[in-house]
Each structure stands twice: as structure tokens, then as C-alpha cells.
Image (spheres, rainbow, N blue to C red):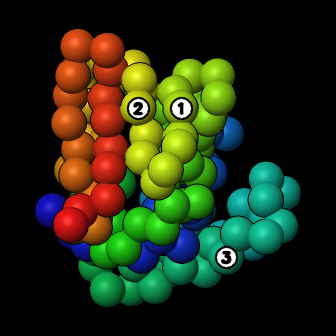
Amino acid sequence: MQSITLADAYAIESLRSNDYTNSDIMEKVKEGKTDDFKSFNKNTDYSVLDALNASGDLEAVLNDGYQVKFVTENGLKNLIKMKYGKEDGLDYLYDNNQVTGLQLAEDEQQDLKNMLSQNWVFKAEENGISITPAK
């Protein structure tokens, strides 16, 4: 599994949350049209996808998944919202630097667990997923 930056993950998940498929993303990147993605989010640097493609990693990242090298607290909440459509206070609680009560399907749970950096601990519990800082 490839390791990518939080900025890389934001670029990928912002597109996926706007109904871009992996094939759509690959096609635009190969055509050199990452500027077209700016219509979704002007603040996201989609050129990171060009760099991933140039290194030969983009296709594997899109198709096989990835681990984020370092996920911040806000990064965790943003990724959960972008990737799963779940919001703090509505779909889970974020308090004292931890996520509790997050409900995801089994495949989504595995995906989130794989995606998290080493500074987080993932636990599937009866009342939902908890994610706490590693000690």
C-alpha cells in the first residue's frame, strides 16, 4: 500500500465526493487537465495528482488504496467527511482528540483503518468506531 500526503488524499477524496471515478481521475491527469478539477475546490492543489502520476504511483493509490503519512486532527475529520459523508456532531462525536460512535460498513472500516497514519489507533466497538491518538 502506497503512503501519500494529506494534501494528496484531499485531492483524491474531494474528486471522489464529486462523483469522479478512478478512471475519470486517471484520464484527466494523463491528459494534463488537472486544472479542470479547480471548479470543485479552488483551494485544493490538484497538481499533486500530476506528481503521483509522474512517480508511477497514482493508479495503485486510486485502485489499491493508500495510507496517509500523517493525519492531523482536522485532517481526520475532513477525510471522514469527504470519504464517507459523515459529519462531526451528526454522525459521530469528536471530543478530547478522539472520534467515537462512527458507524461505517465493514469494507469502509477496513479502508479507514488502512488509511490512518501511525499517530492514530482504530478500534471497532459495539457502539461504533473509535479513533484515538497513539501514545
Please identify the quadrant where the C terminus is shown.
bottom left
Q: Which mark is residue 118?
A: none
Looking at marks 1 and 3 on the same chain, the residue that comes earlier in the sequence is marked by: 3
Which residue was labeled with disc 2? 100
Q: Amino acid at mark 3?
A: Asp
Distance between mark 3 and mark 2 Cα atoms: 30 Å
Q: How many marks?
A: 3
Q: Quadrant of residue 100?
A: top left
Of badges 1 and 3, nearer the viewer stands 1
Q: Residue at x 53, y 79 (%)?
A: 48
Which residue was labeled with disc 1? 93
Q: Are marks 1 and 3 in contact (CB under 8 Å)?
A: no
Q: Residue at x 65, y 29 (%)?
A: 89
Q: Which mark is residue 45?
A: 3
Expressed as whole percent of the image width and height from the top left, the position of residue 119 reads 28, 67
Q: Residues within 10 Å of mark 2 (few under 14, many from 20)?
A: many
Q: Amino acid at mark 2?
A: Thr
